Structure formats: structure tokens, C-alpha cells
Image (cartoon, helix red, strand yellow):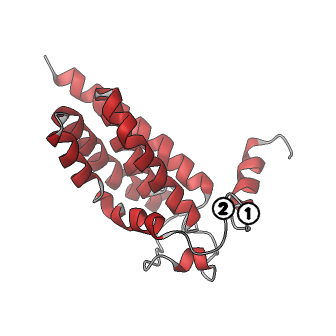
């Protein structure tokens, strides 16, 4: 450890490719793969919003979807500008678990950014609903590192950016609400 935050993030990213108890290189459990696939294009958040609306959290559900709807294209735009290579883990069983072979920019993780935007917007409106959604947000983020399609810093950056998007959307909504 050099004490330089950039070097430490780079070291964390490099270490993520190695087999460890926390992050094995073996094929991930089926439920991790299923959650990762379901979250493609933000699709996971539509049925989650439906469940939230069904249990009386309609406003939180709508705000979550709006935030996710802003985060996803913004993530793609940032990825096009920043153009970071994905981890070189194509031969690992963890990476082969996903049928997709993403070749878009690795930073930020669009899955993590959309998940964080949805979860943060829901939590800002209803802390109880946010607590219910938070584990799913965490699994989506974990799945992207566990399947080796993203560096940890891509996922952490996506989570931070998604949270910022949710707060910006919330502020914009509050500004327009009389």
C-alpha cells in the first residue's frame, strides 16, 4: 500500500481477478447470475416497482423508475466518454457464467448505477421500502464483480453516480412540486 488512493484502487481492481474466499473465480451461484441477467437494461426495476406500488408505495416506485430511467442513459454516455477496458477474465468460470460478452466501457457499471439510482430514490421517499430494496441493489452490484465483467471500482463508481442521480432527480421533482 502506497497511501495513494489511485494506486490503492488500482491494486483493489487487480486483486479482484484472483481467487479468494470473498471472490472465488469459480462459477457463481445461479441466483447471482439470474439477478445480473434480470438487471440488464434496468429491466429488474420494473417488476420491483410494481410490487412496491402493489403494497402502497406507488410514489416511491415511480420515483425509483424515474431515477433509474435517467441513470441508465447517463451511464452509457459516461461509458462512451470514459471508455475503460473490462477485466481480462474471459477464461474464468465466473466470467463464462453469463451468456453475455459485454464489450462496452467498463466504467461506470450501468447495472450498479441504475440499481443505486432506483434504490436511493425509493429509500429517499420511503426508508422502509428502501430497506426492502437495498439487498437487491447489493446483489446486483456484487454480481457484476463476481462474474468478472467489471472492476470493483466500476461498480463502486456506478453506485456513487447512481445515488447522485437519485438525489438530483429528487431535487428536480421537489423544485417543481408546489
- Residue at (24, 45) in percent of width and height: 65
Say left or right for 130 vs 106. left
Left or right of residue 55, residue 13 in this image: right
User: In the drawing, does residue 2 fall left or right of residue 156?
Assistant: right
Measured as percent of width and height from the top left, residue 175 is found at 22, 21
Q: Are marks 1 and 2 in contact (CB under 8 Å)?
A: yes
Residue 152 placement: quadrant:
bottom right
Residue 150 image-quadrant placement: bottom right
Q: CA distance from mark 1 to mark 2?
A: 5 Å
Q: Quadrant of the C terminus?
A: top left
21 or 64: nearer the viewer: 21
Looking at the image, which residue sits at the far bottom? Answer: 91
Residue under the point 66% across and 62% down: 23
Q: Which residue is mark 1?
A: 20
Q: Position of residue 124 (x, y in %)?
A: 34, 28
The number of callouts visible is 2
Amino acid at each position: 500500500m502506497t497511501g495513494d488512493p489511485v494506486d490503492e484502487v488500482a491494486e483493489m481492481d487487480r486483486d479482484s481477478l484472483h481467487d479468494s474466499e470473498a471472490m472465488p473465480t469459480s462459477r457463481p451461484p445461479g441466483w447471482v447470475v439470474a439477478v445480473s441477467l434480470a438487471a440488464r437494461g434496468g429491466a429488474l426495476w420494473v417488476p420491483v416497482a410494481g410490487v412496491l406500488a402493489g403494497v402502497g408505495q406507488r410514489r416511491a416506485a415511480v420515483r425509483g423508475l424515474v431515477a433509474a430511467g435517467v441513470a441508465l442513459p447517463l451511464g452509457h454516455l459516461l461509458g462512451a466518454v470514459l471508455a475503460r477496458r473490462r477485466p481480462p477474465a474471459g477464461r474464468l468460470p465466473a466470467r463464462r457464467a453469463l451468456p453475455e460478452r459485454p464489450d462496452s466501457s467498463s466504467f461506470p457499471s450501468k447495472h450498479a448505477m441504475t440499481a443505486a439510482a432506483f434504490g436511493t430514490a425509493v429509500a429517499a421517499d420511503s426508508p422502509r421500502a428502501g430497506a426492502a430494496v437495498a439487498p437487491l441493489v447489493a446483489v446486483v452490484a456484487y454480481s457484476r464483480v463476481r462474474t468478472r465483467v467489471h472492476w470493483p471500482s466500476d461498480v463502486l463508481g456506478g453506485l456513487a453516480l447512481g445515488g447522485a442521480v437519485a438525489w438530483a432527480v429528487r431535487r428536480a421533482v421537489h423544485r417543481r412540486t408546489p
